[in-house]
Image (cartoon, rainbow, N blue to C red):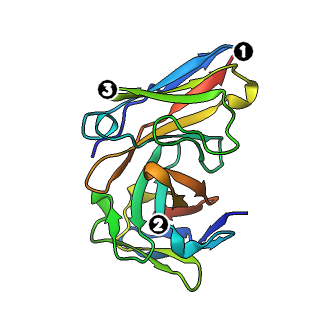
Amino acid sequence: EVQLVESGGGLVQPGGSLRLSCAASGFTFSAYSMSWVRQAPGRGLEWVATINKDASNIYYVDSVKGRFTISRDNAKNSLYLQMNSLRAEETAVYYCARDSSGWSRDYWGQGTLVTVSS
Amino acid sequence: QSALTQPPSASGSPGQSVTLSCTGTNSDVGGYNAVSWYQQYPGKAPKLMIYEVSKRPSGVPDRFSGSKSGNTASLTVSGLQAGDEADYYCSSYGGRSNLVFGGGTKLTVL
């Protein structure tokens, strides 16, 4: 059974940093691209970043470029998102998701809540 | 990259069919066969319902179908059931390695 479990969320002040983790199991992690998608309270989904199988290609939404870094450790079956210079409007549930055909995301974690507030 | 446009709400009675729309541009929806649809219950993670415009993942009932015409994609839910009441989001490849989502449609089963 495919499982994705996020961790690392919490309360952080504006301008602060946080590192999210996603532990994957039930599939060959190194064979898939992975993504982070966020959802602000009461709002829609927003794609944040994608990393391919061997981390040779990485993509970000424009609003996080230069501040967020997606990475992975295939030996540990883990995906990460380092978030720096956080803004209040980035308060959201952050989901990790497995990439599939046609830019779809076929499995999602339960999400981890990041609250940016003073 | 602008979000795709979805009506905020839609409704139908049990047994009826309802079609949800997702409008983009020729730079996203109209330019690629990379439209997906997700179902999300409150407080839960999204679930993939349709990918590549009209393909259903294993386990998704065939009451759910997808299509596209020009810059507008559609999700049709036939034989509406109470359990179909949820938020539905579309997404599309937006070029330059970007993924764009719609704002979501809240489907109510009357």
SS label for mark 2:
loop
Per the model, the C-alpha gap separating discs 1 and 3 is 29 Å
Residue A39 in sight: no
- Residue at 34 percent across and 40 percent down: it is B3
Q: Quadrant of the C terminus of chain B?
A: top right
Q: Amino acid at mark 2?
A: Ser
SS label for mark 1:
loop
The residue to which callout 3 is attached is: B70
B47 lies left or right of A56: right
Would you say the residues marked 1 and 3 are in contact, meaning their CB atoms lie under 8 Å apart?
A: no
Per the model, the C-alpha gap separating discs 2 and 3 is 29 Å
Measured along the vertical axis of the image, is residue B108 above or below residue A109?
above
The residue to which callout 1 is attached is: B15
The residue to which callout 2 is attached is: A33
Q: Amino acid at mark 1?
A: Gly
Camera-side mark, 1 or 3: 3
Instruction: Say which label, 1 or 3, has the lower sequence index.
Output: 1
Q: Label 1: how many residues lie within 10 Å, few (<14), some (14-19) or many (20+)?
A: few
Per the model, the C-alpha gap separating discs 2 and 1 is 39 Å
Q: Position of residue B103 (x, y in %)?
A: 43, 37
Q: Position of residue A21 (x, y in %)?
A: 55, 74
Q: Nearer the viewer, residue A20 or B14?
A: B14
Chain ID, mark 3: B
- Residue at 60 percent across and 60 percent down: it is A111
Camera-side mark, 2 or 1: 2
Q: Nearer the viewer, residue A75 or B62?
A: B62
SS label for mark 3:
loop
Q: Label 2: how many residues lie within 10 Å, few (<14), some (14-19) or many (20+)?
A: many
Q: Are marks 2 and 3 on the same chain?
A: no
